[in-house]
Image: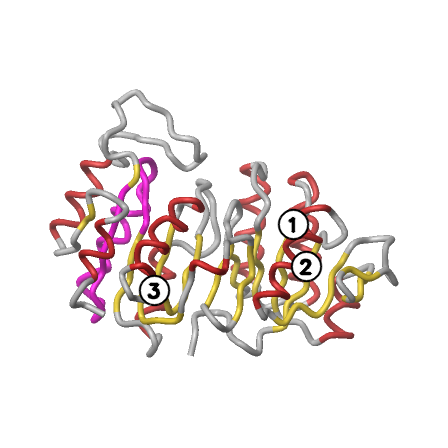
Amino acid sequence: MAILVGGSTKVIIQGITGHQGTFHAGAMLEYGTKVVGGVTPRKGGEEVHGLPVFDSVKEAMAETGATASMVLVPAKFAMDACYEAMDAGIELLVLITERIPFHDAMRIKAYAKSKDIKVIGPNTPGIISPGLCKIGIMPGHIFTEGKVGILSRSGTLTYEIVDWITQGGMGQSTCMGIGGDPVIGINFIEGMELFEKDSETECVVLVGEIGGTAEEDAAEIVPSMSKKVFAYIAGQTAPAEKRMGHAGAIISRGRGTAESKIKAFDEVGVPVAALPSDISKLLMGQV
């Protein structure tokens, strides 16, 4: 069992003929993901890595049976691409594109909710269930099969922590980058609920950062979980006036600081690592 994606997941890539789409299609195929085609309007009939390119998501789904789409189109076209996929009946959208306008992201989220469609992102490295499926841009070689579920707001920080966990002799059940923007699809709470139901996950690691209230909100549901939760908060040493790179890194009225997040986790018994490398140490004996 895996979270949202597995060995049988069929994936299409919207924007497959672009440089990034072509590159990551190849990397996903090499990993073993069942990429079955791609979509670029007016380029139907072409091929990328031997995969058929279609003019529309509806046509691609009809021909391939795909249930998931990775969106790698420019920000100004991302909302239309997501709407097209959702109207075609896609079940999972992995929205890699960054710098999507705030109101576009709000509309995507609201439309997905109305259709009960899962959205990961925007501004996400994607999702991976090691050994089964990778939908995204993460380096697959650092992941290994295991029992640790990971939810993260940061892409590159995710890779560092995963690498430490793997070097510590532990593996991951599923790793999801939820995205660093203020408006995202699946958030920490929804991800934690998915992991709580997953028989292959024994504990959950939350990789957060200063700004926003996602971590404080997540702490509130920890007491209802049967699985142990661990955390790391990026920006613990940042000065009060420091602005982080993510659009979601906004501190307001005392919430969103590293201190408030760590305090929220401390109150519900969640160990918080001081350094990314400490996560694997905290997990020792738990997995």
Give the mark, 3 or 2, whose residue is nearer the N terminus: 2
Quarter holding residue 85: bottom right
Q: CA distance from mark 1 to mark 3?
A: 25 Å
User: Which residue is tagged 1?
Assistant: 72
User: x, y percentage for residue 226?
Assistant: 20, 71
Q: Residue at x 66, y 46 (%)?
A: 78
Report crowding for label 1: few under 14, some 14 to 19, many 20 or more residues within 10 A (C-alpha): many
Q: Amino acid at mark 1?
A: Leu
**SS at mark 3 in the image:** strand
Q: Residue at x 17, y 46 (%)?
A: 264
User: Which residue is tagged 2?
Assistant: 13
Q: Nearer the viewer, residue 284 or 59?
A: 284
**On screen, 212 above or below 172?**
above
How many numbered markers are drawn?
A: 3
Tell whether position 221 is magenta: yes
User: Which residue is tagged 3?
Assistant: 149
Q: Which residues are magenta?
A: 207-233
Q: Amino acid at mark 2?
A: Ile
Q: Residue at x 70, y 56 (%)?
A: 14
Report crowding for label 2: few under 14, some 14 to 19, many 20 or more residues within 10 A (C-alpha): many
User: x, y percentage for residue 13?
Assistant: 68, 59
